[in-house]
Image (cartoon, helix red, strand yellow):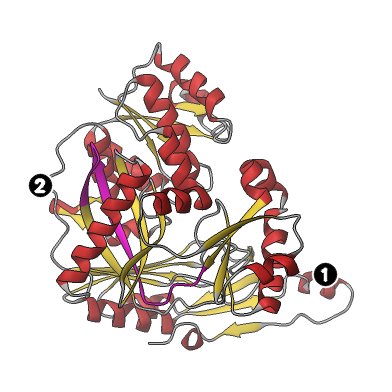
Amino acid sequence: MRRLLLLMTTQTYRATAFLNAARRLGVSVVVGSERPQALAAANPAGHLTLDFFAPEEATRTIVEYAQTHRIDAVVAADDDGTILAAMASAALGLPHNPVAAVEDARNKYRMRQCLAAAGIPGPRFWRFAIDRDPADMARQVSYPCVVKPLSLSASRGVIRADEPAQFVAAFHRLIAILRQREILASRGAAAREILVETFIPGPEVALEGLLTDGRLRVLTIFDKPDPLDGPFFEETIYVTPSRFPRPMQEAIVASVSAVTAALGLRHGPIHAELRVNEHGPWLLEIAPRSIGGLCSYALRFADGISLEEVLLRHALGLDVTCLERERVASGVMMIPIPQAGILREVSGQEGARRVPGIEDVRITIPVGREVVPLPEGSRYLGFIFARDETPHSVEVALREAHRQLSFVITPAQASHGQEEGQSSVTSRVDPLRLVQP
């Protein structure tokens, strides 16, 4: 039986999808995670504890394990495992991306440097140390601009500024995020610098693809129909197939192919995000992994095969060229967090599931937990999934299902106030205000 090393943090949304895909393929799975698994003692050969942020040491652990347990592929479920996956695959002689290419893709400043050197159009960009005077930085950049961390994902810490005062405010807000203990511990030098880019106007798209020996195969292009103009960049709806004209879709594919070549990415999944305007497509981000969260449930291929199964087949060297995306349109909505606080109640889920075209509604933050919106947060309240005949009807279904939902969120300090005799404040969120058609 073939054996797969699956790298995933304990915070991943995708464990079930990958494990189900491996089970369907009849593949044995070794889970590599940053913490010991609860059932590891019952099956010690099925679990490895690895420090994703010390990849050299983790690679030695993997190589030692492989001396007695053959590993046929290494797959990273999320961003944090991509560098380790490349290092371990190289050490084991498995197909992989060059480690330097993955490191360049993971660092937004180095990515911009590589693309500029290759002559690929992009925004003007600046890198600053976090101990610089923000007022001085504000005088050096062009407006409107976007302030970014070098290595965080899911739009965390990404803030638009239209003039110097907004830049200074955005800088302080981002620095507060970067100084959080877990980010300082995991990101190292990348947490001591920031990137600033000129803002690129236009709607966004996302391309999901697979690289084999440097050749890009497009799995799908998602449209993002909601405007993402800032000041924060919380994504909501993804719909496929794309409604852009064929020539623009071809330009998007050509742009992503040029980017992967410039970075030196050669093998495995890629997730690219671009803006599109009258000058063509402009790359925003590219990651050597597949789409995040539970969004992969919006993709199905021939015979109901999941995206995760496609990825495992590819990693194991199985043929995936015949696996085409289903013909119907599909989409996902990442349910935004409208305000910070404690999630007290969620209602309307059954009504949302009854909307024609809706397949499922999953609330992924339990009631009673703290919720934090962007730019500080990194999670969504949940996900809504739809399938229908056209991209337009999918988008309509997602919006209607979202309108059925209601959330009660109270300020995080409310429980302390009650102990002191103060009344708590309850905010019932009206989803109609969150996403405009």
Furthest residue to the right?
420
Q: Is 206 within the magenta?
A: yes
Dot 2 amino acid type: Cys
The residue depicted at 40 percent of the width and 21 percent of the height is 91
What mark, if any, has residue 322 been given in the picture?
2
Q: Does any portion of residue 241 appear in the rendered image?
A: no
The residue depicted at 17 percent of the width and 57 percent of the height is 325
Name the side, left or right, on which 184 lies relative to 77: right
Tell me if residue 239 comes above or below residue 182 in the rendering. below
Q: Quadrant of residue 231?
A: bottom right
Numbered-mark total: 2
Query: Marks 2/1: CA distance?
Result: 58 Å
Q: Does any portion of residue 148 appear in the rendered image?
A: yes
- Residue assigned mark 1: 416
Foreground pick, 197 / 190: 197
Which secondary structure dominates the residues rendered in magenta? strand
Q: Nearer the viewer, mark 2 or mark 1?
A: 2
Name the side, left or right, on which 319 lies relative to 415: left
Tell me if residue 222 comes above or below residue 163 in the rendering. above
Which of pointers 2 and 1 lies earlier in the amino acid sequence?
A: 2
Callout 2–callout 1 Cβ contact below 8 Å: no
Dot 1 amino acid type: His
Foreground pick, 262 / 57: 262
Range covered by the magenta-colored residues? 198-217
Q: Is 232 within the magenta?
A: no
Position of the N terminus, as image quadrant, is: top left
